[in-house]
Image (cartoon, grey):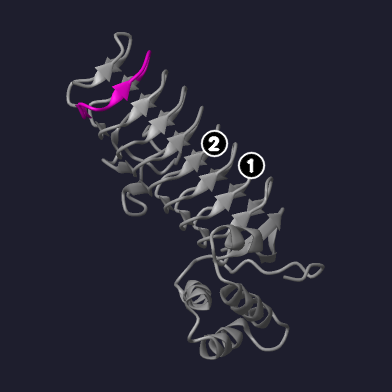
Amino acid sequence: MARIHPTAVVEAGAEIDAAATIGPYCVVGKGARLAAGVELKSHVVVAGRTAIGEGTVIFPFASIGHQPQDLKYAGEDSILTIGKRNVIREHVTMNPGTKGDHLETRVGDDGLFMAGSHVAHDCVVGNHVVLANHAAIAGHVRVDDHAILGGLSAVHQFVRIGKHAMIGGMSGVDNDVIPFGLAIGNRAGLMGLNVVGLKRRGFSREEIHDLRAAYRLLFAEEGTLQERVDDVAEMFKASAVVGDIVAFIRADTSRSICQPRAERAP
């Protein structure tokens, strides 16, 4: 039987696994599903059709699954899906989707969402993602695996953050950031590659070398971006990591690609 503190309120219809823990003064709505090992520390509110995966721990005063902060929201029956083994710290807010997109917000596995961070409606967040304190992603944003958003950073609606990218603290990101990129500033510009992160995650010297060379060619002054992407795709067709960048740039998107700042080299 689930461990539920006597001061917690769990509405009829909520699905609580026997190995879940609900601490003092939490409120769990009738549409919520808590898997094995989920722990709500205290004063956590889980509302709406929210599914929380195994081993996720949520700290006090987080608001999970309440209606989107979108004036177009009209009460549609939408979903928030949170994966396994996430750590969701104090005052984090996560909202479900809307009919303006796919009616679902999805958060992957093994993420760290530090105090005050925000995941808006219709976002898709990958695995091993970190949102530092008070980082916020607006509606319809996609954050791919292993990306890190620094404290107090903000990401514009519909922007994509590529895998293994790093967003510096207090940055305002209004364009797509390529995989492995490092973006800083207001408005954010590319400052090179997230080389420190790549080394920490075990990328080889050859992979990092290919990424550096491809980066310089992609953001050179000659030709159009499309021409440079085609050239890089041909030159580095044997490199999977460069292929990730090429595929990211070629993908359909409503935002431009974040460009390097002139004063910094990769």
Residue 216 left/right relative to 24: right
Q: Is residue 69 above or below residue 234?
A: above
Quarter of the rendering occupied by the C terminus = bottom right
Residue 9: image location, x then y, percent: 29, 15
* Residue that appears at 53% across and 55% down: 147
Q: Is residue 236 left or right of residue 97?
A: right
Q: Residues within 10 Å of mark 2 (few under 14, many from 20)?
A: many
The kind of secondary structure element at disc 2 is loop
Q: Residue furthest right?
A: 263
The disc label shown at residue 196, or none: none
Looking at the image, is mark 2 or mark 1 earlier in the sequence?
Answer: 2
Q: Say which residue label 2 marks.
A: 114
Query: Is residue 22 shown in magenta?
Result: yes
Is there CB contact under 8 Å for labels 2 and 1?
yes
Q: Quick check: can you spot residue 119? A: no
Per the rendered image, the range of residues in magenta is 15-26
Dot 1 corresponds to which residue?
Answer: 151
Amino acid bearing label 2: Met
Q: Secondary structure at mark 1?
A: loop
Q: Which percent across, then down, holds residue 5?
A: 31, 12
Residue 172 rendering spot, x and y as whole percentages: 65, 51
